[in-house]
Amino acid sequence: MALNLSPTQIAFNARGDGKFSLPFQEQIDFFRQKLNLPTEAYDDILKAAHDRAFVVAGATKADLLNDLRGAVDKAIADGKSIHWFRKEFAAIVQKQGWEGWTGSDTKAGRDWRTRVIYNTNIMSSYSAGRYAQLHDPDLLKARPYWKYIHNDTVANPRPLHLSWNGKVLHHTDPWWKVHYPPNGWGCRCRVTAVRASEFKGDKAPNDGTYTKTDRDGVTHTVPKGVDYGWDYAPGASRTTPLKDLIDQKLMRFPAEIGAEMWQVLKPVLKAEQLKAVQDMVATASASMMPAGAGVIAHVMEPETVSALKNYDVDLSDAAIWLRDHELIHAIRETKAGRGAALPLDAWLNLPEHLESAVAYFDKVNKNVIYAFDLPGVVGKVAVELNKLDKVRDAGVRRKITSNFIVTGGIVKLENMQESRYVPLNKQP
């Protein structure tokens, strides 16, 4: 039920230890549009990814995530206390048989972990809901400036957060993109809208940066005063295509988990995946000049990942990449002239074809062949497994070990009956 709150009302229990009072509809709506996403570690996803995904570090099972999400949803929508949440969490963990999670060994550890899950979801959803309220056109017209407000109830306040207290900047100031609170674990700072008369010429603080190298060896530059992974504005990216975030995550997950994860998310992400492939294919086929672009065209099914182990193939991940270099080679004019090329339409709709394809293991080349029906012919793509190579995705060029489509064309189905080809996922 929608709650009739003023856009400038604050619905936040400052202490963070009792009931979370006065939840508001924008906060509830923000949390409920998220998708459950399995994770192994807290930094599997960072920053804006949290606008689209509900995660609990280490929770990879769908049923476990569903139950945890239900408890967090009730805490937000019904204003439940952390004491209530702790009881729910304990019951869920016991029911689902979740063991060995970080903090499980001691009461202090359990209290810390449940506080992190509770407060992080409460605060991020609160801030995202406020972000939506603060962008109401009528409110922006009347109160175009935002004021940073430090929470005075924090026992050990961060010095820089204290220094930002009372800072008034226009809502379009770039500073808000990475300093809109919360700005770290346990941060309870907030933002309120104010009239232009309150602006006294404040300049955006420049407190310098620090670097953090993650477990993949990637170095991140973060503003001082902001915890690693918190340099984003909660709620600002809730319409960002989730596929970009999933692609990056699939490269981190072991193949078994990534394959299972995709089965859960596929119904929601199929359209985004298809569009990403179509955009790349259209650009590459128009220019016929490789730019190093790559996109995940398919994710192997759990049964395919499992079947490959029978042939001593232990996949690094379950993703299958299509890159413009191999694509352009496959559709080059000379090959098309021989009638051996896949039609351009087949490349444009490759995710749908791979979804219905039979996957074969080629025992000679140690790769996977996907064969699928086209009008009057059978199409195929060959996938090289566990290949160390470079790919440019979301504007970043990185070296990864993954699975890459290396060629595509037309095949005679009877050729796939040779003893060297073994079906992995279904009978042809």
Image: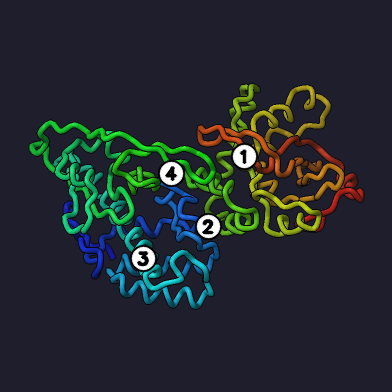
Which quadrant, please, contains the C terminus? bottom right
Q: Position of residue 357 (x, y in %)?
A: 74, 50
Mark before the other along the chain sequence, 2 or 3:
2
Q: From the image, which quarter does the N terminus lie in?
A: bottom left
Secondary structure beneath dot 4 equals loop
Q: CA distance from mark 2 to mark 3?
A: 18 Å
Q: Which residue is mark 1?
A: 400
Label 1 – label 4 distance at C-alpha: 24 Å
Image coords of residue 246 (percent x, y): 53, 48
Q: Is residue 17 left or right of residue 289?
A: left
Residue tagged by mark 3? 112
Residue matched to label 4: 240
Q: CA distance from mark 4 to mark 3?
A: 31 Å
Q: Is residue 273 left or right of residue 1?
A: right
Q: Residues within 10 Å of mark 3 (few under 14, many from 20)?
A: some
* Residue tagged 2: 40
Foreground label between 1 and 4: 1
Q: Amino acid at mark 1?
A: Ile
The extreme left residue here reads 197
User: How many C-alpha atoms fall within 10 Å of the one at disc 2: few (<14), some, or many (≥20)?
Assistant: some
Nearest to N terminus: mark 4 or mark 3: 3
Q: Which element type, helix, strand or loop, lies under badge 2?
A: loop
Q: Badges 4 and 3: C-beta atoms under 8 Å apart?
A: no
Q: Are marks 4 and 2 in contact (CB under 8 Å)?
A: no
